[in-house]
């Protein structure tokens, strides 16, 4: 049933799949903690998504004046693989620092996705494609309306999505040495 009410009783939402969208910036692990906590509470899985912003048509044309299409594609693939590896390393470090009491929690991360495109569009597409029940993402600045990278992305996602979104304000200052760039 699509309603929150059934026969006069409220139905508690069933969260099985969490999409954690990250820009891999400093202190991003602050928001990742919310994804981990949500997955623990609901016995859910986590998909981690990082979107590399696509080049503008002008930038793409400029690249093509210096490099062959095959070379551009090879470099993009290599960059994606390197980012994927870096994210895996950061997840391992996060688990060693923060999940000593519950090492099984890291197994909740069932997918790491590095894609190229428009961040808001790719977040929406991935949430839909994976059948996610909730999206968790960090934002920089003083609020979701501030026009910083993830702030404007968060705003665009909120206007178009049909599932709950947790927007986590990421602290600018160094919170503690355990915050990483997940």
Image (spheres, rainbow, N blue to C red):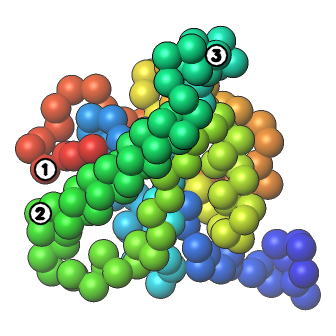
* Placement of 81 over or under 168, stated as above or below: below
Q: CA distance from mark 2 to mark 1?
A: 7 Å
For marks 3 and 1, give the one nearer the viewer: 3
**Left or right side of 6 for 125:** left
- What percent of the width, then of the height, locates residue 123? 64, 48
Is residue 125 among what the camera can see? Answer: yes
Which numbered marker is on residue 61? Answer: 3
Viewer-proximal residue among 91 and 166: 91
> Neighbour class for label 1 at 10 Å: few (<14), some, many (≥20)?
some
Residue that mark 2 sits on = 97
Which numbered marker is on residue 148? Answer: none
* Placement of 5 over or under 33, stated as above or below: below
**Left or right side of 112 for 120:** right
Q: CA distance from mark 3 to mark 1?
A: 42 Å
Asked which secondary structure carries label 2, the reply is helix
- What percent of the width, then of the height, locates residue 44? 51, 79
Q: Badges 3 and 1: C-beta atoms under 8 Å apart?
A: no
Asked which secondary structure carries label 1, the reply is loop
* Placement of 11 over or under 66, stated as above or below: below
Residue lying at 72% horizontally and 65% vertically, measured from the top left: 129
* Placement of 93 over or under 74, stated as above or below: below
Mark 3 vs mark 1: which is more N-terminal? Answer: 3
Mark 2 vs mark 1: which is more N-terminal? Answer: 2
- What percent of the width, then of the height, locates residue 72? 51, 34
Residue lying at 33% horizontally and 35% vertically, measured from the top left: 25
Q: Badges 2 and 1: C-beta atoms under 8 Å apart?
A: yes
Residue that mark 1 sits on = 178
Mark 2 vs mark 3: which is more N-terminal? Answer: 3
């Amino acid at each position: 049933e699509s309603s929150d009410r059934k026969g006069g009783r409220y139905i508690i939402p069933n969260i099985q799949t969490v999409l954690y969208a990250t820009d891999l910036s400093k202190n991003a692990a602050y928001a990742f903690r919310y994804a981990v906590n949500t997955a623990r509470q609901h016995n859910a899985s986590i998909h981690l998504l990082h979107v590399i912003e696509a080049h503008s048509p002008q930038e793409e044309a400029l690249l093509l004046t210096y490099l062959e299409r095959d070379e551009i594609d090879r470099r993009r693939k290599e960059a994606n693989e390197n980012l994927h590896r870096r994210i895996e390393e950061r997840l391992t470090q996060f688990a060693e620092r923060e999940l000593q009491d519950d090492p099984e929690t890291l197994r909740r991360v069932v997918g790491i996705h590095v894609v190229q495109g428009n961040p808001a569009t790719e977040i929406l597409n991935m949430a839909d494609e994976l059948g996610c029940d909730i999206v968790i993402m960090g934002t920089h600045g003083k609020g979701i309306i501030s026009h910083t990278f993830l702030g404007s992305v968060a705003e665009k996602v909120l206007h178009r999505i049909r599932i709950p979104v947790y927007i986590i304000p990421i602290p600018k200052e160094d919170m503690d040495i355990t915050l990483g760039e997940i």
